[in-house]
Amino acid sequence: MIKKCLFPAAGYGTRFLPATKSMPKEMMPVVNKPLIEYGVDEAVEAGMNEICMVTGRGKRSLEDHFDTNYELEHQISGTGKEAMLGHIRDLMHTCTFSYTRQTEMKGLGHAILTGKTLVGDQPFAVVLADDLCVNPEGPGVLAQMAQQLYRQFRCSIVAVQEVPEDQVHKYGVIAGDMIRDDILRVTDMVEKPAKEDAPSNLAIIGRYILTPDIFDLIADTEPGKGGEIQITDALLKQAKEGCVLAYKFKGTRFDCGSVEGFIEATNYCYDHFYRAG
Ligand code: UTP
């Protein structure tokens, strides 16, 4: 039903300097696969094969990753190494990839608005590829949101998880009314609150389903916290005018934008995917 998935990938990744000085954060490999490819896999699993990316200066390798590399493929043709490209070749056949550039890094809300030209007037998903999500027990987080929740509720949905109180200042934090043991109807949303101002400890992570009216709401949003155009400010307006749901997803999320989360994800993926074959 939802076919398009938008990947805002224009940020500077300053928490990972110097690695991200000339390399996109989204191209950092967790074991032998870049973060962006984990995100695209999750989108495809959720039935989305129109992949839209918002990139920026120095991010060309993202486009190259989802394109043919003739010299390399010629070089390894007929050898055992060809199999290592099998999965990415499948993705290239299954999906379309389109790109646009954010020329000024004015925040996640602004990056999403920049993607309007690729998304058009339809509901879409957003994946922040530096949040790597896994759910060994069942469908991935985006599939849970798109195929189970959106089908039923037809409104914007944000994925949330409980975080320790001393971590809330890193996230958008929601408050809401419980409508199911894993779903809240959002009533408030604060970007990176101080511990004492946080309306709860439910933090928004990098998975969203958005209805296209969000674009006008972002366009009307003034810069907020940190001088950036915040998606949380636009979502709060949407929640007040209509409905936004917060979903306590099933699975585990690794914050690969931080060194600690990246190492945890690497250890997890090595054990569960790489070594397990
Ligand atoms: P983050 O704040 O996590 O990413 O933004 P960052 O700015 O790249 O990283 P740090 O904090 O400096 O280490 C969340 C997501 O939004 C994208 C980022 O690429 C990331 O996927 N983003 C953020 C944009 O595309 N454009 C922006 O202007 C800001």
Image (cartoon, rainbow, N blue to C red):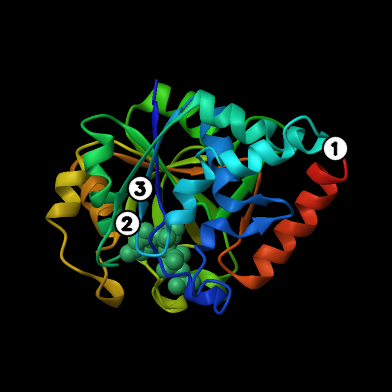
Q: Secondary structure at mark 2?
A: strand
Residue sitting at x 39%, y 74%: 197
Image quadrant holding the N terminus, namely top left
Q: Which residue is mark 3?
A: 186
Q: Quadrant of residue 56?
A: bottom left
Distance, label 2 to label 3, CA atoms, is: 6 Å
Q: Which residue is mark 2?
A: 188
Image quadrant holding the C terminus, namely top right
**Residue neighbourhood size for the residue with mark 1, other residues' Cα within 10 Å, grouped as few (<14), some (14–19), many (≥20):** few
Q: Amino acid at mark 2?
A: Asp
Residue sitting at x 23%, y 45%: 238
130 left or right of 113? right
Residue 267: % across, % down: 79, 58
Say which of 201 and 261 sits in front.
Answer: 261
Which comes before the other along the chain, label 1 or label 2?
2
Please give the label number shown on residue 277. Answer: 1
Residue 230: % across, % down: 29, 62
Distance, label 3 to label 1, CA atoms, is: 41 Å
Say which of 138 and 247 sits in front.
Answer: 138
Marks 1 and 2 in Cβ contact (< 8 Å):
no
Residue sitting at x 41%, y 28%: 150
